[in-house]
Image (cartoon, helix red, strand yellow):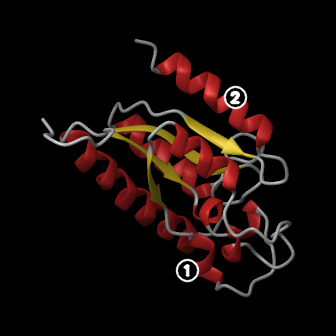
Amino acid sequence: MWTDKRSGKIAIVAHCLLNQNSRAQGLAKKPNTIIKEVINFLMRNNIGIIQMPCPEIAYAGVLREPRTKNEYNTSLFRKLCRKIANDTFHIIKKYNSHGIKTVFILGVEGSPSCGVNEVSGILIEELKILLTENQLTIPIYGIHLENPKKDIINLEKLYRNLHKH
């Protein structure tokens, strides 16, 4: 379909993986604003990046105290997450319809919005609903911000398994 050298692969990533300035007060543990292990993994594998908006910034602002999932689990916040999930899903569909595959959705473990396993974040829940309703399977993986190296090793294995020729 494409006549150039694009890779045909993208990843949808949680906002704070590319911008630690978006984290709630006291949660940015490293001065690097980008989780470089994630970026390096995506670059090594020629995977483009789509950064999801941060629902917590939109809802509670940049200078905010940390909140739990229960504290964020209001109808207004869920509606906001549903809108972001819907917008993200439409981006995935547009790329997909032109042969560009979403290989991963990367969340952030422990996040009330973008958690995957330890906490099922509200934005990730809303995105999973849309994927399921539309019978679209995309691996969703949670990154531990304190020590992402182990996650990257696991992502490399998962990626190799999914893309065996």
- The residue under label 2 is 154
**Residue at figure coordinates x 60%, y 63% from the top left:** 18
- Identify whether 139 is placed above or below 20: above
The C terminus sits in image quarter: top left
Relative image position of residue 125 (x, y in whole percent): 56, 48
Helix, strand or loop at disc 2?
helix
Q: Could you classify mark 1 by the number of other residues whose Cα lies within 10 Å: few (under 14), some (14-19), or many (20 or more)? A: few
Q: Nearer the viewer, mark 1 or mark 2?
A: 2
- The residue under label 1 is 58
Mark 1 in CB contact with mark 2 (< 8 angstroms): no
Horizontally, residue 27 falls left or right of residue 62, namely right
**Residue at figure coordinates x 72%, y 72% from the top left:** 23
The mark nearer the N terminus, 1 or 2, is 1
Q: State which quadrant residue 55 falls in.
A: bottom right
Closest to the observer: 26 or 85? 26
**Residue at figure coordinates x 59%, y 24% from the top left:** 158
Q: State which quadrant residue 17 falls in.
A: bottom right
The amino acid pointed to by label 1 is: Ala
Relative image position of residue 146 (x, y in whole percent): 84, 53
